[in-house]
Image (cartoon, rainbow, N blue to C red):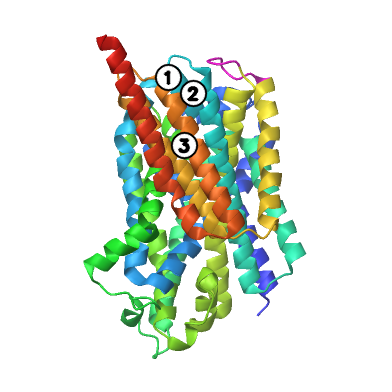
Amino acid sequence: MNTTGLIYAALAAALLPFAPHIWRRMTSRTSTLDAEDHYTANREITSTSAAYSIAASWIWGPAIFVSAQLAFSGGVQALFWFLVPNILTFFTLIPIASRVRESYSGYTLPGFLSERSGGSRNVRNLFIIQTLAFQLCAVVENNIAIKMLLSASEAMDAAKINWVILFIDSACVGFVVLCGFRGAVRSEVSQMLVTIVCCVGLAVMLLVFKPAQVQFVNGLSGTSGASWNPFQWAAMGMGGGVAMALGLIGGPMGDMMFFQRLCSVRKGDPVKRALKLGAVLFAVVPICMAVPGWLAASVADLHSLAPDTIAVTSVLAILPWKSLGLFLLALIVFNGLITTLDASFSSISAVAGADIHSEQGAKPTRSSIRKSWLMAAVFAAVGVGVMASEISLLPVFLTDAAIASSMIVPMCHAVFSKRPSPMGLTLSLAVGIVISLAMGISGAVTGNAALSSFGAPAAFLGGSIILGLTLIKRRATLVM
């Protein structure tokens, strides 16, 4: 089996949807350097296309490995704390997304919160920091995921892996520069379709052609032999499930990838339809990718395998057609990686162009758009550098969850309050940033996963308390 050739073939297949859009752009006489077109596709995206694009951008590369890892180690109950919040996040966003789409004609989350807080620069600047930190974590996580795939497949050495990841990041940045947001959405639709077909096909192949000694039902409890006792499920939630749930549910509320797509849905096309369909499309992937984990957990000889790469090693150990299995798995991972990366770089570019290189409330100029591309390139370079530092996936994921959790309360207050408090938003955002980054980075440096996992509830509670106290003080002042 030529593993290296299979990996390169899967990468080429994952990048193939870029080709027609690049060709169209290179042969077109029209310019995409208009903010409406480059950042929102002139707000002409249909809800169906938005659903596929949202689902594709939400399937981060790590989710493919995390699903199999949780199913392998903790069984159904571990996957529950990952899958259900991931699906709920689409539905909890519906009321927020509908209001934002009806009332906001700008481009970014920082711009929206600034507008809702009466033009507060502090709110805008703090949310720029949170948004960019969140996107940087997304880039790092996906780079780590592709490194995990290449390392587990033993296709190439560490130096070559870093160069491959740098090439992928550069290709995604270049695609965003050339084709803008419209090209990203169109490519993500086709990539999501391919991902679903590959996931279902791989899961069916594993279940149908597995060896006789591999019993799917026996692996549903994972290697830990987790029971179906509801109290144990609750205990697992307190041990990290709640942190994951908060981060996943809060993620889209402060995620420019979601926000950019929802703001681009054309008027009259219901945003809630895009989110409901996106939830269904997304759910297919983690459920199918849990199958390798459950199958591996049913065989005692496979319990010694590393959980974080069980998706790869399980497919190679169980499936008779190892080459086909590795190709499908690599294509799924590359698709998840690339769709999230181009969505992330598009979001970074939008924030840089509309919020950093433009005056507050002003439409980004051609010069601002060009300058924003440099920010995307810088984040790509930093993401590769952090990945190359040998940092593990879990602390980055938990830091990302903490940042996302810190955005829940400020976003809800900005959307649903008739008169949002600029001071309350400023303090809540500031406290959330400090707690999430401090606990996340400390956990990553010390290797203490528990410290990182408490970052999400701590950031959520800290921001909530500060905002609540500020609102109480404002009401008391008004009464006096």
Residue at the image point whose x is 60% and y is 65% from the top: 148
Mark 1 nearby-residue class (10 Å; few <14, some 14–19, many ≥20)? many
Q: Which residue is mark 3?
A: 432
Label 2 – label 1 distance at C-alpha: 7 Å
Residue 72 % position (x, y): 42, 73
Q: Identity of the amino acid at label 3?
A: Gly
Q: Is residue 151 shown left or right of residue 450?
A: right
Tag shown at residue 422:
1
Q: Looking at numbered disc 1 in the image, what kind of residue is underneath it?
A: Pro
Whether 296 is drawn above or below 44: the answer is below
- Residue at 70% across / 27% down in the picture? 371
Q: Residue at x 42, y 19 (%)?
A: 422
Residue topped by disc 2: 123
Dot in front, 3 or 2: 3
Q: Kindly check if marks 2 and 1 are in contact, taking CB atoms under 8 A apart as contact.
A: yes
The CA distance from mark 3 to mark 2 is: 13 Å
Residue 315 x, y percent position in the rendering: 51, 76
